[in-house]
Amino acid sequence: MMRLAAGGLIDRSRSVRFAFDGRVYTGHPGDTLASALLANGVRLLGRSFKYHRPRGIMTAGPEDPCALVELRTGARREPNTPATAVELFDGLEAQSQNRFPSLRFDLMAANGWLAPLLAAGFYYKTFMWPAGWWERVYEPLIRRAAGLGRASGLPDPDTYDRAHLFCDVLIIGAGPAGLAAALAAGRSGARVVLCEADARLGGRLLAETCEIDGQPGAAWATSTEATLRAFPELRVLTRTTVFGAYDHGTYAAVERLADHQPFPDAHQPRERVWRIVAKRTVLAAGAVERLVAFPGNDRPGVMLAGAVRCYLNRYAVAPGQTAVVATGGAEGWRTVEALAARGIRVAAVVDRRAEVPPAQAALAQRIGARLFAGARIGATRGATNLRTVIVEGATGGAQRLTADLLAVAGGWNPQVQLACHLGGRPVWDETRAAFLPPTTPPPGMEVAGAAAGRFGLGESLRDGTRAGSDAAVAAGFATTAPEPPSAPDDDTPATPIWLMPGRKAFVDLQHDVTMDDIALAHREGFRAVEHFKRYTTHGMATDQGKTGGVLGMAAMAALTGRSMAETGTTLHRPPSTPVAIGALAGRHRGKDFRPTRLTPGHAWAAEQGASFVESGVWLRAQWFPRAGETEWQQSVDREVLAVRNGVGVSDVSTLGKIELAGPDGGAFLDFLYINMLSTLPVGRVRYGAMLREDGFVLDDGTVARLEAERWVITTTTANAARVLAHMEFAHQVLRPNLRVAFVSVTDRWAQYAVAGKRAREVIQAVLEHAIPDAAFPAMACGTFGSARLFRISFSGELAYEIAVPAREGDALVRRIVAAGAVPYGLEALGVLRIEKGHPAGGELNGQTTARDLGLGRLLSARKDFIGRAMALRPALLDPARPTLVGLRPADRRTRLRAGAHLLPRDAPARIEHDQGWITSAAFSPTLGHPIALALLTNGPARHGERLRAHDPVRDGETEVDVVEPCFVDPEGLRLRG
Amino acid sequence: MRIPCPHCGERASEEFSYLGAADPLRPPPDATAEAWHAYVFLRDNPAGNLREFWHHVHGCRRWLIVTRDTRTHAIAACVDPRA
Ligand SMILES: [Zn+2]
């Protein structure tokens, strides 16, 4: 066992059981999966991406590049989870990744011998040809060999939430700087939100032995948390990672509510994505330890020096029994001290510096560690675990040291990502040997503590106090900065980046990118940071190069002879850490993503056994099958004939309805529609069409004048929202002086079309009111009790549309049916309108003019209206434009299909012979044969011509005759009933 | 983005829909074809402040004129054209 006898922030009074690759182990509450595995002596966690090299635990935080496991089982299986970020819970199950057939004996490790083939850019070079091999050979091969964990492939059984927070001061990170900032901002009374990714507040204070205000660091964090939680306006969000900075003080964070449990409690979301809007923000995200590049730096047992201290101090785990520490300065010596204090043998300290300060040399001597000054790591050895460290001395010559832990001090990378999300570039600072936040962070943000390169504890606390106080003041709270918590300053110089070239010196452990790959990219000319990153995939894995990214840049800088500042970094974009798509989607899943709207008559239609179809945001009845009907076409034919020969009823509630009022309503309608509407008398309805300002048709519908200063207009179902926005623009921006007001009333009215020669008797029965032709002729409208009646026809039959308040719709449609009307659905409605040649969806496609649709006669020359000027463009007046016609199949039997293109009979099917296309097609039960509407060049002049309808996609080839677009009752006699 | 609607206060940008530059003015009906073409199709694409239409669709439903820096998204003003 590697668990230390005492210490640590774990609850030794309780044990939790967990399984890794099927074997059961125990740990304690407070452990991570990584610390518990180390405590059980498990150091081999997975195989690497390209070379299947053994990999272990390198860090103690979520940034770990290689301690990736599959967590949980079944539908909850989640790949690529860093074991270093998983809180241990009872019953946790994890599996190693990317191994075949087993973790210890991995056949694919032979890839290590194929390394030259798998070097940078190998996808681009190796799998180029033959092209036909891509789908059959290369892609399956790559998919089997590459990739790490496996997704479950099952629907996510958990729920996720999205929520909003508004605050005066957002503090990101609860390490020393963040806690100090929260103390300073909280006491001002400002609304403060403190987000910490860890389950515990404290950050590095939990991992180090230090004192603040005379207390141990971790104890100070605990007492500070109590102080903070007593501020009534301060909210602490633990297990919450802020992953994106957006415009105007908007931040996104994910709170892991149940990831530390086997599964969420009943009704508990697994994760919650917060949108936080903050007046001011203090970024105190700390720093992440850097990797050191040397040959074999990926072997399990190689660990970052700060992570070693974290395992010793926070988790009371010895990451090894015999350690070698490699360092370039004080950072590694702190780890030497920590190891020695816990009784772990330090075999040697490899110090990059030729001159090691006397105090450190004395420490080495005191604990019996060999000191190699001015030395480097030449290689590591060991099959699946570190056994030997080969040290190369300053004067040449190599020493083989037996060790199972190699702690490397690579220095620290400030966590500047969030400061760069709005486009700022990090700035290289030579003295701190780190990229610092950009000079222009997002407005309202200040960076404090280690995230700003202020690594010392004392300066970090002072910086946090100042930043928190400043943020509260800037947010409008009168306060003065309190006395900062006191801690000794750490004046040790920063640790510079350390590159030791050689074979298999990794700079990106998750994507298996080595210094050789960077050198290859350099030789092949991919030298700019954005180029070599993509060529080598350096920094493009899920860890986003948090530990090794800077190393690759340093390697390229060394090769090009440019400085780090000249080499620069790539752009940072949200999310700065992987976020589950499910969390981003929140509750917007399935029907909750796009709710279905139901008409007031829906329940009635469902009782009739209607088949429903989505029509825009609505669900509409498509047809109403009856006993004995086996094909939908039989139902539709019967419904159409019921309208043509008797009377039918159809739900048209989904049509957009907009009510207008005001003395200038007529003038406004004249401006909106192509035809004259101000002259429409009270009690009358008129058909109209609207254009966009570019001259093409926007929508069509009816305008009814209910009273002298009150109108109601209809829009197509699909365009209801667009037309309302268009009208608002026309009024608010273009004609603000017109005294008119309007509002959408689509949902407030249930509306039914009653059509057929017996429509009048049905309506009279329903209204219990006589509506003789003389009193209520075609295009009349009026009010009968709560009902509005319009004598308008889409089918060409004697027809009415009757509208009642939505709550009365269900009762109304039942009364209409009881009075003898046959229900007909959307399909029959479509057939009826094609038989009459009325343009609808297929024709109102945004590319047709009023003339194209045969509505040219409506264009008024006596007024200005939207789209008039552009509709008069010569090209839009060209008679050769495709214009609405009707089509019949020459043999009267062949089905016609929308989308087929029209060609002269003798012309080959090439684009230069294309003369138009079929926009809508149906079988007309009235005529007994298929019919279609089409847009045909020079259309109106070509009635009687025979053409080819060519449909290569569906193998259709039909001869068609061009006819008038109106197939039934072209004189309009039926309308008058 | 957060847009300070003069009627509703500061609101998130997804409550709005976007139209584009607000400064081209609709020409009189008898203007030249060139003037109409310019109004309907031609837009400047400045790197800097742009006055543009945003429609507060999920709010007051007013068409607002927002002065936004296209480089930084900094919003200098948001006014109702009737004001
Ligand atoms: Zn508003």
Image: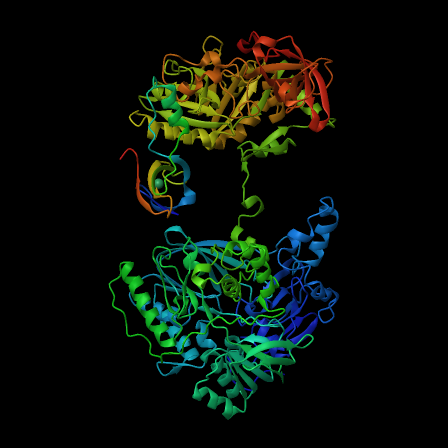
Q: Determine whether A692 is above or below A267 in the image.
A: above
- Left or right: A842 in relation to A783: right
Residue A431 in percent (x, y) is at 39, 70
Task: Using residue A302 as the reference point, say whether residue B82 is left or right of it.
Answer: left
Q: Quadrant of residue A13?
A: bottom right
Task: Say which residue appears at 43% left-offset and 19% top-offset.
Answer: A704
**In the picture shown, does residue A423 fall above or below A106?**
above
Vertical relation: A752 (above or below) A520: above
Q: Total number of numbered labels? A: 0
**Quadrant field for ligand 1:** top left
The image position of residue A68, as x and y in percent, is: 61, 66
* Viewer can see residue A27: no
Q: Quadrant of the N terminus of chain A?
A: bottom right
Task: Name the residue nearer the viewer: A619 or A846.
Answer: A846
Measured as percent of width and height from the top left, residue A278 is found at: 36, 56
* Res. A64 in view: yes
